[in-house]
Image (cartoon, rainbow, N blue to C red):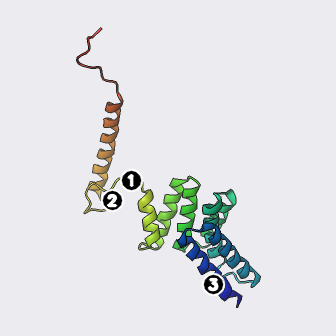
Amino acid sequence: MRDTAARLAFREGLCALDRGAPAEAARRFRQALDLERQAALRRRQLEYLSWLSLSAAMAHGVTPECVRACETAAKRNPFDPDMQHNLGRVYLLAGRSTDALAAFERGLRLAPGHARLRAQRALNERRAPPVIARFSRAHPLNRILGRTRHALRGVVARVRSRQLPDRESPRP
């Protein structure tokens, strides 16, 4: 019975997050986690902990406890793409974009079609698209052209940043 109540509280928490009410979601996830612990069930505790950490970070700001709890949940259940997604979002809220992208990539290796992971990675991607879209990013031609493009952007930026003298002004 408690398992059903815990699942119901969890679903209500997800709905609250969808509505943009992270404080209410955190309360529901906490309720689900407490019910699961009271029933001495361990099946969903990590899932509830992960979502609780994310919603608490969204509602009240990121704390080291939120990050640690989400990392713990993701490490203990490394094959759940939702946990990687939640960890990545907590990292983003904490300003750790490199760690966030790594979490999103780990999640996408587990579930390449995971819509939320793909959307988050696309929003936070720092790399330019492949030069030749028909080939993969790892294709040798894309790698060479990509490195060349990156080098040329650096040269252009250095040239633009120089103070070039006006041609019409008299020379000393």
Q: Residue at x 54, y 62 (%)?
A: 89
State which quarter of the image contains the C terminus: top left
SS type, badge 2:
loop
Name the residue that disc number 1 marks. Answer: 127
SS type, badge 3:
helix
Question: Separation of disc 1 and disc 3 at Cα?
Answer: 40 Å
Q: Residue at x 33, y 56 (%)?
A: 129
Dot 1 or dot 2: first in sequence order is: 1
Name the residue that disc number 2 marks. Answer: 137
Disc 1 residue type (three-letter): Arg
Q: Is residue 77 placed above or below 7 in the rendered structure?
A: above
Question: Separation of disc 3 and disc 2 at Cα?
Answer: 43 Å
Q: Residues within 10 Å of mark 3 (few under 14, many from 20)?
A: some
Residue 96: image x %, image y %?
Answer: 55, 53
Question: Separation of disc 1 and disc 2 at Cα?
Answer: 10 Å
Q: Is residue 38 placed above or below 25 in the rendered structure?
A: below
Disc 3 residue type (three-letter): Leu
Q: Are marks 1 and 2 in contact (CB under 8 Å)?
A: yes
Q: Are marks 3 and 2 in contact (CB under 8 Å)?
A: no
Mark seen at residue 8: 3
Which of the two discs, 3 and 2, sits closer to the camera? 3
